[in-house]
Amino acid sequence: MSSDSPTRPPAPAHPRPLAERMAASLRAEFGPDEPPPAAAHPKVQRIVRLWQSLRPGPGLLPGRRHFDPLQAPDLLNNIWLMEVVDEDPRRYRLRLVGGALVEAGTGIRKGQFFGDVGSREEAASAAQVFRHLERCRRINWRRGPSALGYMEHVRELERVILPMAADGVTVDIFMCLTVFYYADGREV
């Protein structure tokens, strides 16, 4: 393997099974006109409200061009963008990765396909969520343990996935935001 090839972080000696980690999560899926869960972190609530305000019309999704990072500079550290790549079977490629994700040790990097992050089972589970959201055009929120087995050092995380569409209809990118809750009480 060349040094330019993507590598997976080493797995912990005894990771909890993915199903066990995911079962401990709070989840919600909601429509573009619905509010985020009341229990959502203020950063999550703010990015959802901002996304909703960017929608160019009823029944339409905002596109990447509608989002100006200057509208939410305090959220940029937690934002990551996942583009839909129709011509590649790996399908989902990271276009932007905020500093909080790097600091937390997620192992994701700009330009990397999501299937190259974590175990094959973890990547397949994430791809299933993105495929579903691509079809239904809804918002997905989750708070709980990391889906990545090597992230056991993060007590909990909270993330929201917001579909975006250049034409207002066909999802071509997801704007995501993740907040990390560490065992020492820090929220990043």
Image: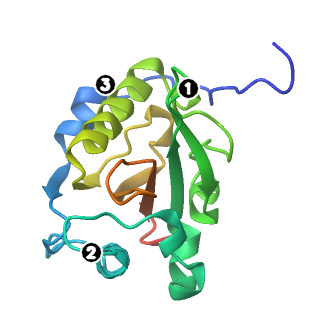
Q: CA distance from mark 1 to mark 2?
A: 29 Å
Left of 10 or right of it: where is 63? left
Q: Nearer the viewer, residue 70 or 117?
A: 70
- Quarter holding residue 109: top right
Q: Residue at x 51, y 48 (%)?
A: 82
Residue type at the position of mark 2: Gly
Q: Residue at x 15, y 72 (%)?
A: 33
Residue that badge 1 annotates: 87
Q: CA distance from mark 1 to mark 3?
A: 32 Å
Residue that badge 3 annotates: 17
Contact between marks 1 and 2 (CB within 8 A): the answer is no
Contact between marks 1 and 3 (CB within 8 A): the answer is no
Give the vertical position of 131 relative to 184 (above or below): above
| Disc on the earlier residue, 1 or 2 | 2
Counting from the top left corner in percent of width and height, residue 50 is at 36, 80
Residue type at the position of mark 1: Glu
Q: Nearer the viewer, residue 109 or 171?
A: 171
Residue type at the position of mark 3: Pro
| Disc on the earlier residue, 2 or 3 | 3
SS at mark 2?
loop
Quarter of the image with the N terminus is top right
Counting from the top left corner in percent of width and height, residue 62 is at 38, 67
SS at mark 1?
loop
Residue that badge 2 annotates: 57
